Image (cartoon, rainbow, N blue to C red):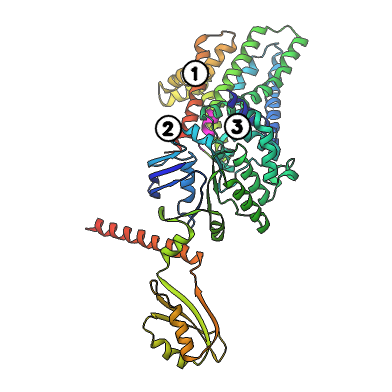
Amino acid sequence: MIELKKVCKNYGLTKALTDVSFSVKKGEIIGFVGPNGAGKTTAMKIITTYTAPTSGTVTVGGYDVMKNPLEVRQLIGYSPETVPLYSDMLVREYLEFMGAARHLNGNLKSRFDWVVQAAGLENVLNRKIGVLSKGYKQRTCLAQAMIHDPEVLILDEPTSGLDPIQIIGVRKLIRDLAREKTIILSTHILPEVATMADRILVISGGRLVADGSFEDLRKKVTQRNSYYIAVKSTKKDFEAAIKATPEIEDIEYDHEQPRGIVGAHVFADHKVDLVEKLNGLIREHNWTVVEFQREKISLEDSFIKLTQAATEKSGSDVAAKEEGGAE
Amino acid sequence: MNDVKIIFNREFKAYFYSPIAYVFSIIFIILNSGLYMFHFFFFGNADMRAFFSQLPLTLGLIFIPAISMRLWSEEKKLGTEELLLTLPMKTENIVLGKFFASFLFYLVALAGTLVIPILLLILGKPDFGPIIGGYFGSVLLGAYFLSIGIFISGFFSDQIVSLIITSLTCGFLALIGWQYVPMVIDGWLPGVGQFLYNYVGVTRHFNDIERGVIDLKSIIYFVSFTILFLYLNAKSLERRKY
């Protein structure tokens, strides 16, 4: 449905996107993740035909964004990050205007009713947009993106500024739509992508650094297995037992456990499973287990690792270029 | 064509959301009628020559910049430009919709000055040829200045900056057509003033029409420049892509 091939975008000397390629199938929900200024919004602006790529090609539904922008725009519903709305218009007037502008003609009435109900705007239809709360503005903006029943929805930070109940509402709305629509949404809130997106694209420093499901990404950044174990013992005995097990690469003691209990994070290579070994140790020393669990790397950690790795990489690229220039 | 109408409807309504438009229309009507009344009582002639001779200046300096400044600058400030330009519409049609909305608003304000010919009709026997010519010229001149205003508005996100630059541009075009201004310029740079008067100033063309000489050349001058600036506006908005 959406295909980007080697897309680059420069703003003057700043490189906003470098060699970004990915494709999105019909009906997929894509989560766009990355730190501020990574290029998420730029990529979305290119897909929606608002800006042109410096090089590379982008097609939506088979139409090239540069050659057939009108056809692409007809397929797309777009809600920008800044929630741009005409503050002097009534919500009703605004949605009618956007519906007409998207060539709804005869369907306008039924689509209008549907979108008002779906976005929960019944009570604010006759209010000026300027006086609405952030949450209602966000929902009005989502409503205009959906009013023409587009095949592709591009949502830039659709839940920013909403309260937790509204966030759940918007997520539900997006999930309900998801069955038939292709959706790209960007967000900082990581649990959100984990619950909503089929696939996550991590973008950092203008480059696509990861592409895959949440589990794929987690595997990608997990270099070693980690376990937490807390037993009734003395530190001395515990240390000796750990030292006698060569599979354990590293250990970090947890100093918050009370006296008489030793707690520690134990690490091993990602190919080695320590569950059996640790259970063996427990039986051997006859320890009473207080806590024992396999630790999963959190979404936040994997996000940080992925984006940091990318920044370091692009940082070294720049350094290498500078060295080359000096020669 | 339908797209033009959709944009036109919204834009024309938008003028009445804020008080700025009302304020400027009232200022426009009072200023022009007031300045005219001075001549009217002083010379006691039942014609509108004084009115039409000051009109290019009041239009170019104040009224047109005031109604054209918001057309794109407001969209840029609110960020709505992004949604507007990603609608399935040609940029040309959006520009035309905006232009016609501001043009109609101008015509409404201009209609407010029709009190004067009615007054003249009651008080004396005015020659309607120059009056009709004058209004016809004002319509063309307004369209031309508006197209410059909308073009300039496309570059700035600050309405005041658009207002000032449009005011300077249109004010210059109006002033250069007054006999004294090219003469002063000729004093500094011989030939330049006359050149500007002949080829750049609008007042000369406006005066031709206003005198009742509806010359095809002058009409073509106004219409073609209006179309040119609207076209440039659409192109400049599409250029943001590169």
Amino acid type assigned to the residue bearing label 1 in the image:
Ser
Mark 1 or mark 3: which is in front? 3
Amino acid type assigned to the residue bearing label 2 in the image:
Lys
Q: Chain of mark 3?
A: A
Q: Disc 2 to disc 1, how far (Cα)?
A: 29 Å
Magenta portion: prevailing SS class: helix
Residue at 73% in and 42% down = A127
Q: Disc 2 to disc 3, how far (Cα)?
A: 21 Å
**For mark 1, what is the residue?**
B224
Q: Chain of mark 2?
A: A
Q: Quadrant of the C terminus of chain A?
A: bottom left
Amino acid type assigned to the residue bearing label 3 in the image:
Ala
The reply to whether label 2 and label 1 mark residues of one chain is no
Q: Are marks 1 and 3 in contact (CB under 8 Å)?
A: no
Q: Please name whichever residue, B105 or B177, is drawn nearer the observer in this view of the structure.
A: B105
Please tell me the numbered disc located at residue A101. Answer: 3
Q: Badge 1 local density, few (<14 within 10 Å), some, or many (20+)?
A: few
Q: Badge 3 local density, few (<14 within 10 Å), some, or many (20+)?
A: many
Q: Chain of mark 1?
A: B
**For mark 2, what is the residue?**
A67
Magenta-drawn segment: B148-155
Q: Position of residue A97 (x, y in %)?
A: 64, 34
Q: Position of residue A323 (x, y in %)?
A: 26, 60
Does any portion of residue B171 appear in the rendered image? no
Residue at 42% in and 75% down = A273
Q: Please name whichever residue, A94 or A4, is drawn nearer the observer in this view of the structure.
A: A4
Residue B153 is covered by the magenta coloring = yes
